[in-house]
Image (tube, rainbow, N blue to C red):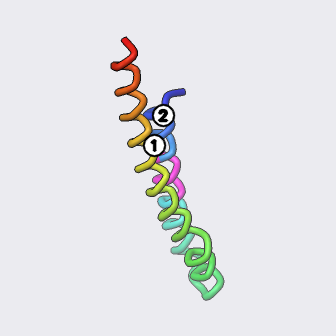
């Protein structure tokens, strides 16, 4: 699987997770749910954005390396 395909897949999975979490919040809205969001989901989303940016940069570098090796 290419870096770009992995990036796209990761974005889709994060979108799915956030949609499911939004649905869950409508039924589970107490201090524990807020702590789960604060402790796990917010850092996960931040880290995934960082990873996705790194994957995009890596994809560009790999494409450049391929062009230079042709």
For mark 1, what is the residue? 55
Residue depicted at 53% across the width and 60% down the height? 20
Count residues near mark 1 (Cα–Cα under 10 Å), then give few for <14, some for 14-19, many for 20+: some
The percent position of residue 56, horizontal first and vertical second, equals 39, 42
Please identify the residue farthest to the bottom as the structure is shown.
31
17 relative to 37, above or below: above
Q: Are marks 2 and 1 in contact (CB under 8 Å)?
A: yes
2 relative to 17, above or below: above
The secondary element bearing badge 2 is classed as helix
Quarter-wise, where is residue 1 in the image?
Answer: top right
The percent position of residue 52, horizontal first and vertical second, equals 45, 49
Please identify the residue farthest to the top as the structure is shown.
70
Q: Quadrant of the C terminus?
A: top left
Q: Is residue 24 left or right of residue 7?
A: right
Which residues make up the magenta segment? 11-17
For mark 2, what is the residue? 3
């Amino acid at each position: 699987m290419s870096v770009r395909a992995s990036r796209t897949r990761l974005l889709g999975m994060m979108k799915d997770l956030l949609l499911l979490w939004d649905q869950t919040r409508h039924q589970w809205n107490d201090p524990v749910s807020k702590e789960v969001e604060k402790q796990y989901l917010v850092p996960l989303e931040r880290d995934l954005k960082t990873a996705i940016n790194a994957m995009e940069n890596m994809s560009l570098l790999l494409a450049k390396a391929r062009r230079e090796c042709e």
